[in-house]
Amino acid sequence: MAIRNRFAELHAEIAGWRQDFHRHPELLYDLPRTSGRVAELCRSFGCDEVVTGIGQSGVVALIHGRKTASGRVVGLRADMDALPIHEATGAAHASTVAGKMHACGHDGHTAMLLGVAKYLSETRAFDGTVALIFQPAEEGGAGAKAMVDDGLMERFAIDEVYGLHNEPGTPVGQFGLRPGPLMAASDRFYITVTGKGGHAAEPHRAVDTTLVGCHIVVALQSVVARNADPLSSLVVTVGTFKTDSDALNVIAHQVVMEGTVRALDDAGRDLAEARITALVKSTAEAFGAVAEVRYERGYPVTVNSPAETEFAARAAETVVGKVARDVKPIMPAEDFSYMLQVRPGAYIFMGNGDSAMCHHPAYDFNDEAIPAGCSYFVTLVEQRLPLSA
């Protein structure tokens, strides 16, 4: 592997930043310590400009190359927020904040981009400008959209943008990506079923919303099984089911359900919204109940642009050799999709080794992946913004 020697030298320092972020997780946009530390380090490296408060708590650091004649700006993005999960790693650097942990590796993403910031500030072996984007609120808060809406691309004149995510189960030193849809859109639906509460011994005097809700859950399975094209990718999941009663001898007056839809194109989202609404209302009506449905569009599909995917693949191949260029799309969502809607770019997966899966209490970012991730980003910059002879 063509790992930069400098990252071997910086490995322990970068891992130290990562473990510090891990000990002090922060959620969504509330990242005073994390974003403050990121800005502090970027300034200490000698970045040419460090701007805070983009998209509430995002940080952007600019580094100019030895030359800037190309006038081009390449954006590199890392997410900073943690998750509301109780950690169960037992690691020496485990979270010190109850109920919060870095269970998705954003601590690693941030630390690697800081390593890139330090390296590029030292070498500047490129023609143009690099915008290092440290983003809040990826975990459900649409922080990427907040930064875009705050003028991220225009303010810093970003031409193209790249991101990465660690991938548990893939060996360290391996990368994978694909052009086109890579990760799914994520929508949410909220269902309220109202019937007629009553005594469990007299169901004929009530309209049993628990029964109605169960039929709705079963009916919703037909959206994928009987409405969607069998060759398309669509997931409909009811995640919560709550009655307004805590007693075993009561027929609940109301049931509330919440769920998620994942799709790899907007046609799938449209189909799911229409069929969920129709099935819920008609099923409730058939049992004498009334149902209300609220469907909310969330993160869009993460779509890699073809040319930039090729650039990213070549950079990764320079670092590690063979790269998986046609990985299967996956159904989790990623708000980097908002950046890819307004600028060409690519998102790539990077091996995290034999770790627990993301969002699991036993997950931990693998510090051995740091040199490969940093080397990939630096190689990408130098290939996209080459210095003329």
Image (cartoon, grey):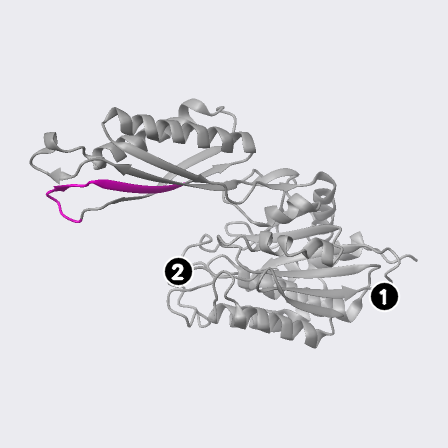
Q: Magenta span has 136?
A: no
| Relative height, residue 313 to residue 328 (above, below) | below
Quarter of the image where one finds residue 113: bottom right
In screen coordinates, is 77 left or right of 90? right
- Is any atom of residue 376 visible in this view? no
In screen coordinates, is 363 left or right of 192? right
Q: Magenta span has 258?
A: yes
Q: Residue at x 23, y 27 (%)?
A: 287
Which residue was labeled with disc 1? 66
| Relative height, residue 364 to residue 42 (above, below) | above
Q: Position of residue 255 (x, y in %)?
A: 26, 41
The residue under label 2 is which amino acid type? Ile
Query: Badge 2: how crowded within 10 Å, few (<14), some, or many (20+)?
Result: some
Q: Nearer the viewer, residue 323 or 271?
A: 271
Q: Position of residue 58 (x, y in %)?
A: 60, 63
Q: Nearer the viewer, residue 372 or 208?
A: 208
Q: Position of residue 55 (x, y in %)?
A: 60, 59
Q: Report how many numbered discs are placed on residues in the image.
A: 2
Residue range in magenta is 246-259
In screen coordinates, is 341 left or right of 32? right
| Relative height, residue 170 to residue 47 (above, below) | above
The numbered mark at residue 142 is none
The residue under label 1 is which amino acid type? Arg
Which residue was labeled with disc 2? 85
